[in-house]
Amino acid sequence: MHIKFEDVTYTYMLGSPFEKRALNGVDVSISSGSFTAVVGSTGSGKSTLMQHINGLLVPTSGQVTVDSTVLQPGVKRKVIKPLRKKVGMVFQYPEHQLFGSTVEEDILFGPIQHGMSVERVKRRLPELLNLVGLHEDYLHESPFQLSGGQMRRVAIAGVLATEPEVLILDEPAAGLDPSGHRALLQLFRSWHEEHGLTTVLVTHDMEDAANYADDVIVMNEGSVKLQGKPIDVFREVESLTAMNLAVPPAVRIGMALRRSNWSIDVTNQSSEQLAEQLMTNWPEKGGH
């Protein structure tokens, strides 16, 4: 599903002494079927931007088009409700959204609200739990008796159970250890590819953008400053530094190597993968 922002402005607490403009005339498009990372420092507007895609927020001015749905000031709830069947959102701490008495009840809540076949979703529950790394024995457990990491997996399974066409990920791996972080992001990337989704990852982690995204949008002070393929965006070192964003280590090393006539592709590579490639190719360059 194609997503388009046209001159979108959003102001929190409009008309109050505390009003604050979070988006400033944003014009940006997200291609159907892409895995797009939206990066920026704290307060850049990236999360505010994403909350417009499923109608959690509505523009103060301008319009957002998601497929054939248009969101603009004064849009009716009856327009927004069908959109939420198509757009799934995983928040920064999805485990905070749990409330069911059992894991099964929690995962089924979203599909029931969207009018999906409960029996069909129930048949898929073992598959969904396995996908997020949990055994089906957990179905009848209270989610609040699980560890924090397990609770997060249950919440994610609940979002995936609704079979969204667009998946919004707002810092979904926050607080996880490096291994858990990588595993979760790889899960989302695999799900994206298998189901042909349009996926948007909101992150401050530039290496996540380099490793998983097809396209990168850089935000600063409520505006889109850069957009393009990761390798092209990360070439703008001075601009990124001015916005307090660091170029991923693998990209910095790869760019330095290319200046030394090394033919190394750093696209969608982690630091570990780049190190392995260097070890493989080093003898060919006569290194010691």
Image (cartoon, grey):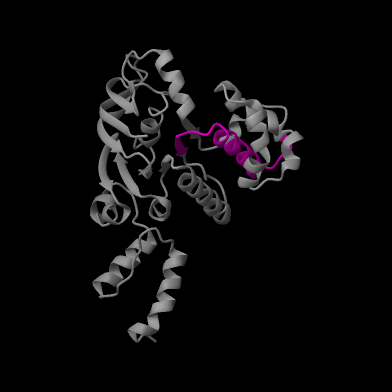
In the displayed structure image, the side of residue 246 where residue 172 appears, left or right: right
Q: Which of the image's four quarters has the N terminus? A: top left
Is residue 148 something one can see in this rendering? Answer: no
Classify residue 281 by image quadrant: bottom left
Q: Residue at x 45, y 66 (%)?
A: 273
Q: Position of residue 132 (x, y in %)?
A: 61, 45
In the displayed structure image, the side of residue 215 where residue 106 appears, left or right: right
Count of all numbered marks drawn on residues in the image: 0
Q: Is residue 166 magenta?
A: yes
Residue 46 vertical position relative to residue 262 in the rendered view, above or below? above
- Comparing 190 with 143, the one in front is 190
Residue 70 vertical position relative to residue 78 in the rendered view, above or below? below
Instruction: Find the magenta span and give its range.
Output: 144-169
Q: Position of residue 229 (x, y in %)?
A: 30, 51
Q: Position of residue 141 (x, y in %)?
A: 75, 35
Q: Position of residue 93 (x, y in %)?
A: 55, 37
Q: Is residue 52 magenta?
A: no
Q: Which of the image's four quarters has the C terminus? A: bottom left
Classify residue 266 by image quadrant: bottom left
Classify residue 265 by image quadrant: bottom left
Residue 115 vertical position relative to residue 135 in the rendered view, above or below? above
Is residue 60 something one can see in this rendering? Answer: yes
Q: Residue at x 71, y 40 (%)?
A: 146
